[in-house]
Amino acid sequence: MNELIYRRELQEALDAADEALYYLNQVDESLQSAGNWGIWDMLGGGFFSTFVKHRKMDDAETQMQSARIALQKLSRELEDVGRIEDFNIEVGDFLRFADYFFDGVVADWMVQSRIRDAKRQIEEAKTRVTGIRNQLSRQLR
């Protein structure tokens, strides 16, 4: 592969990393908001706080689909420059049924725990993609 084509492939991988980070940040913000509403819910916020928390969790799930697509694209672009990366992030189901129908401290605590786990996975993905992005950027200089 000649230098010009390789640099173009590096730029495409860098752009894909930026896109993945954008969506991962969106997921992170929605999870943060869901977690904040979850704390309010645990303090007795009632049905409204449960509803808003779940809306934020739904937002995170929708955004996670976009993030997964962006991460798959990043993986393909990295293959073009000779790197193999596998991004497997499972945010999973957030115990919605239990939270609505057994609205209590235990169910709320379990949902908060799932939100924290999801946030940790997103943070790990963001750190990984940022590292890859920084390497690609250095290679382009």
Image: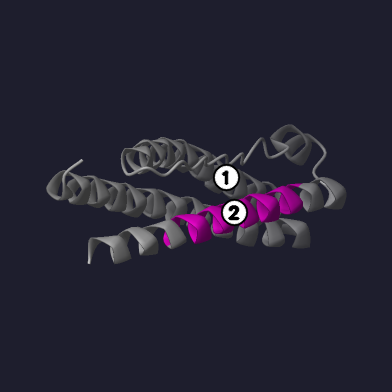
Residue at 73% x, 32% y is: 97
Q: Which mark is residue 95?
A: none
For the residue labelled by badge 2, is the local secondary structure a helix, a strand or a loop?
helix
Residue 29, percent across and down? 49, 58
Residue 14 relative to residue 75: left or right: left
Inter-mark Cα distance, 2 to 1 = 6 Å
Which residue is located at x 31 percent, y 66 percent? 138
**Where is mark 1, residue-wise?**
57
Residue 90 horizontal/vertical position (percent): 61, 39
Quadrant of the frame with the C terminus:
bottom left
Residue 33 among those drawn in magenta? no
Q: Residue furthest left?
A: 4
Which mark is first along the chain, 1 or 2? Answer: 2
Identify the image quadrant of residue 32: bottom right
- Quadrant hosting residue 82: top left
Amino acid type at image mark 2: Ala
Q: Nearer the viewer, residue 26 or 34?
A: 26
**Magenta-colored span:** 111-130
